[in-house]
Amino acid sequence: MVLFIYNFIMLGLQSPSGSTPPPPARPGNTVNGPQLPIDDNIWVLIAIGVIVGIYFIYTRNRAINKAS
């Protein structure tokens, strides 16, 4: 209950930062930062995630079985 009251007060005291719109874009600048093609190689990220997950599961099982 104390955390709820604290959060309510803190959120109420913050200045509304979303009330002002963002600055207008400069003419001729249509790109907002570098374009990184993650979609082209998403299968590589998934494969690396699966391999790392299997490694962590294997090492945890090995440590648990060794301790028993």
Image (cartoon, helix red, strand yellow):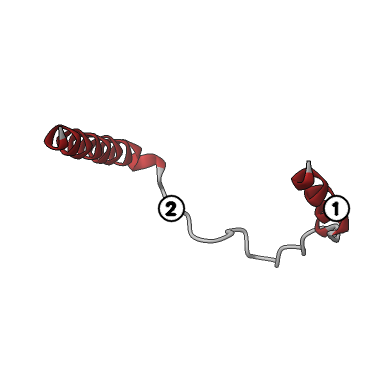
Residue at figure coordinates x 15%, y 32% from the top left: 68
- For marks 2 and 1, the one nearer the N-term is 1
Left or right of 28: which side holds 12? Answer: right
Residue nearest the viewer, comparing 27 with 58: 58
Q: Which type of secondary structure does the marked residue at label 1 adopt?
A: helix
Q: Which mark is residue 9?
A: 1
The x, y position of residue 18, in whole percent, is 81, 55
Rounded to the nearest whole Å, what is the CA distance between mark 2 and mark 1?
41 Å
Mark 1: amino acid: Ile
Left or right of 28: which side holds 45? Answer: left
Q: How many marks?
A: 2
Left or right of 39: which side holds 11? Answer: right
Residue at figure coordinates x 19%, y 35% from the top left: 64
Residue at figure coordinates x 26%, y 36% from the top left: 47
Using a 10 Å C-alpha cutoff, classify the residue at mark 2 as few (fewer than 14 neighbours), some (14 to 19) or many (20 or more). few
Q: Which residue is mark 2?
A: 36
The x, y position of residue 13, in whole percent, is 87, 58
The x, y position of residue 29, in whole percent, is 63, 64
User: For the residues carrying marks 2 and 1, which lies nearer the camera in this image?
Assistant: 1
Mark 2: amino acid: Leu
The x, y position of residue 48, in whole percent, is 26, 41
Choose top left, top right, bottom left or bottom right for residue 22.
Answer: bottom right
Residue at figure coordinates x 78%, y 49% from the top left: 7
Residue nearest the viewer, comparing 14 with 1: 1
